[in-house]
Amino acid sequence: MAPEITLFELGPTRSARCRWTLLEAGLEYRSVGNSVDVFKSAALRAIHPMGKLPAALIDGRPLFESAAISTAIADLVPERRLVARPGSWSRALHDQWVCFALTELEAFVASTELNTDEFVLPKSQHVPEIVAQNGRMFRRAAAALDAVLGETDYLVEGRFTVTDIIVGYTLSFGEEQGLLTGFANLEAYLERLLRREHCTLARHGAG
Ligand SMILES: N[C@@H](CCC(=O)N[C@@H](CS)C(=O)NCC(=O)O)C(=O)O
């Protein structure tokens, strides 16, 4: 029986990772949100303790964190080979790249966004001095990933998987802040991802 999935989402937020995974998985789902009012929703708060997006109900079970939701969706359709098999070494590599993207890359671009955009914090609470440091730290990890992607087209098993959806979103976030300049392999990787029929990443262009 097909799983029953509800996704709380909003355009280009990290929910784009989950929507892309659902499309690659060929799974139907109910979409809740797609307006900033979703942040006021009691149903969202019942799933995500901070009321953040995305959040999901999968067969009635609540789940938050975009990488966890995307990976759980990929696991629902093993026949699509969207994620390495649980327990395999490739699955450990999936975990490795997801952790790397979220901690070594995304944390810095998220901090820059938080300190330059008034969506979460008012300007009076911004710390603009952090932006340059965030850029340096992002590019330090991006250089390492650029070298890896000079050797392979995709991060796990040399084929497209949900790992690339998760990491690709982070790189697109960095590109939006002009942080991919000079990383030819990362730019080519993003181009490969953007050519996929169901890709939900926005094209930002370098610089
Ligand atoms: N690590 C979380 C980040 C979630 C997150 O920060 N979502 C943003 C939208 S992209 C949000 O809901 N921000 C509202 C807030 O911080 O209050 C994930 O990947 O799901």
Image (cartoon, rainbow, N blue to C red):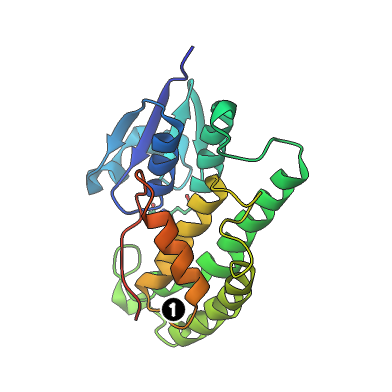
Which one is nearer the viewer's eye here, 170 or 187? 187
Amino acid at circle 1: Leu
Residue for badge 1:
179
For this orientation, the residue located farthest to the top is 1
Q: Whole-percent x and y of residue 167?
A: 52, 58
For the C terminus, which image quadrant? bottom left
Q: Whole-percent x and y of residue 27?
A: 41, 27
The residue at 46%/41% (across/down) is 48
Q: Whole-percent x and y of residue 73?
A: 51, 33
- Tell me if residue 115 comes above or below residue 48 in the rendering: below
For residue 104, side relative to residue 127 (left or right):
right
Q: Whole-percent x and y of residue 168?
A: 47, 58
Q: Residues within 10 Å of mark 1 (few under 14, many from 20)?
A: many
Which one is nearer the viewer's eye here, 139 or 123? 139
The residue at 54%/79% (across/down) is 139
**Residue 53 visible in this rendered orientation of the protein:** no
- Tell me if residue 1 comes above or below residue 130 in the rendering: above
Give the quarter of the image for residue 6.
top left
Ligand 1 - quadrant of the structure image: bottom left
The residue at 28%/42% (across/down) is 38
For residue 82, side relative to residue 10 (left or right):
right
